[in-house]
Amino acid sequence: MRKEKKLKLLEGAISDRGYRVRYEKGSFIGGDCRLRDHNIVVINKFLPLEGKIYTIAKVLSRLEPGELPAEVQQIIDEFGFSSSGQLPLIDTESQR
């Protein structure tokens, strides 16, 4: 799947959960915040597509588990995020 399509799918999924996505310039990567009564995901507009996708996938993985489209869940899984928002444990024994 093309990166542009992945980004659009994630933007749609996060919007469906009541978040607004804003692309701003600054010296940050991005993340979610609450401003007054609005949930917002702020993303550095100068990040490459992969960084924008990563940021939204990370936020989605930390939200309450719900029914996400299979394509969206697959994108989240590609980055190694679990539904609990934790990165998977690394088994150091098997890497030796």
Image: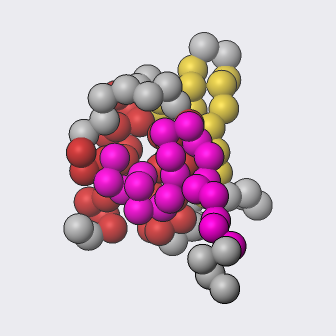
Q: Is residue 89 shown to the viewer in this render?
A: yes
- Viewer-proximal residue among 64 and 7: 64
User: Quick one: which residue is furthest to the bottom in this view?
Assistant: 96
80 w.r.t. 96: above or below = above
Asked if residue 10 lies left or right of residue 82, the reply is left
In the image, residue 40 above or below residue 1? above
Eyeballing the image, is 78 above or below 36?
below
In front here: 43 or 25? 43
Snapshot quadrant of residue 4: bottom left
Tell me the residue at 36%/56% (across/down). 75
Query: Residue 93: x, y in percent?
Result: 67, 74
Say if 4 sits above or below 58 in the image.
Answer: below
Magenta: predominant secondary structure element?
A: loop
> What residue sits 56% from the left and 37% below the top?
84
Question: What residue do we see at 57% from left, 20% from top?
Answer: 38
Q: Which residues are drawn in magenta? A: 73-92
